[in-house]
Image: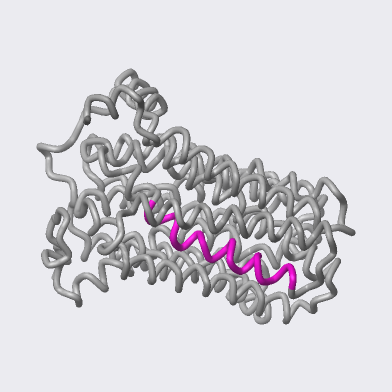
Amino acid sequence: MTIAPERVEETVAQRPPMTGRARFVLILGGLSAFGPLSIDMYLPALPQMAGELHAADATVQLTLSAFIIGLALGQLILGPLSDAIGRRKPLVAGLALYMVGSILCAVAPTAELLIAARGVQAFGAAAGIVIARATVRDFYSGTAMTKFFSLLMLVNGLAPILAPIIGGQILNWTSWRGVFVCLTVFGAILLAVVFFLLPEPLPEERRTPARFGSVMRKYASLLRDRPFLGYALASGLMFGSLFAYISGSSFALQGVYGLSPQAYSLVFGLNGIGIVLVGQLNGRIVGRFPERTLLTVGLVIAGVAGFGVLAATVLDLGLIGLLIPLFILVSSIGMVAPNASSLALAEQARSAGSASALLGVLQFVVGGLATPLVGLGGPGTAVPMGIVMAAFGVLALLAFGTLTRPSAALIAQAA
């Protein structure tokens, strides 16, 4: 039995049956969760890996850099390829490659080979991330697409919360290699589900050639498309703020504010639940309010909350003074991400794979830029985290406001 969600336009009434829709959400949510699961599940094992492989901590940390680079390259290549030959073939191949990379990680005898294996694993994972987002655009548009992206926040919000917890539990009964064995099993399950249950979402008449020159011209065209770039940068910069929180909150909340690891896990989990709840709220109200209005509200709230985080760290307003704006800022991702993604992909029906690739790459590139900035002040202060989160939140609002605003010529023409 296969799932065949109907292609819909603006109305919610044309949605597929709820049973098929729920399964569709789980499949695409699982595919888009590759990133956080593959990054966060093995983080608790980094010290163990360094010791067993007789490698410096900095060398082992390159496994994370290799994964992020592999995700970016994989999306840039596999996104346009899926526009040309359909979604299923690159997705199945990517999932198979992910399994191969995960197995290589599990048996890697040296840190250098582990770094290379992580690059292979990431390239395969990129297929799930970029094609999941493009598939949503294949089946949906308008408000229905935004609602579906909001549904995906259920999975995307929980994945980074559960991944470190799952990884820690795995380490209780096996070594770090067992984490990669579990990721191999996860990839195998998704490969089977996609092969048997996910239909080809892109018909042949909507496919476009994937010649190198045409792909480069398409990317150049997207980067010149001010509305697309504005929505993509707004989303990417907000994810940069989120990456700053992920990379800096452990040191800030435990090292500066004295939280225990258990209390920190609770705070981290509550903030993740905030993303999920706001994402579901967004899905319920998007039919009553335009996506652009909701995106504006989400970005303004994030910007104000960012200044709240900064004020709490600079003025030493205490733990509660920090946790409240931190929760608001992180939760706002649940409103920003689905609306920004939907608006960015709205006019890209024939190149959803390429557009999805640029969306994903911007998120990881900006996130990669934000992560090292958090540590510039050393371990004894939370101020750099506050500065980066506030700055990226404001930049997201500025990118949205300046790049997606209609030009004077268009306003005059409409009048």
- Snapshot quadrant of residue 216: top left
Query: In this orientation, does residue 16 appear?
Result: yes
Q: How many marks?
A: 0
- Residue at screen point 84% across, 60% down: 315
Left or right, 106 with respect to 338, comes to: right
Which of 258/305 is in front? 305
Specify the quadrant that holds the C terminus.
Answer: top left
Does residue 328 belong to the magenta stretch? yes
Which of 192/236 is in front? 236
Query: In this orientation, does residue 60 appear?
Result: no
- Snapshot quadrant of residue 408: top left
Left or right, 340 with respect to 47, comes to: left
- Residue at screen point 73% across, 81% down: 262
The location of residue 407, given as percent across then percent down, is: 35, 27
Q: In the image, is residue 216 above or below residue 376?
A: above
- Residue at screen point 44% across, 55% down: 337
The location of residue 316, given as percent across then percent down, is: 85, 64
Specify the quadrant that holds the N terminus.
Answer: bottom left
- Residue at screen point 11% across, 64% down: 14
| Outermost residue to the top | 213
Left or right, 25 with respect to 200, comes to: right
Prevailing secondary structure class for the magenta stretch in the rendered image: helix
The location of residue 312, given as percent across then percent down, is: 77, 63
Q: In the image, is residue 276 above or below residue 136?
A: below
Which of 85/218 is in front? 218
| Outermost residue to the front | 415
Left or right, 49 with respect to 216, comes to: right
The location of residue 249, given as percent across then percent down, is: 72, 63
Q: In the image, is residue 223 above or below residue 396?
A: above
The stretch of residues the image draws in magenta is 321-339
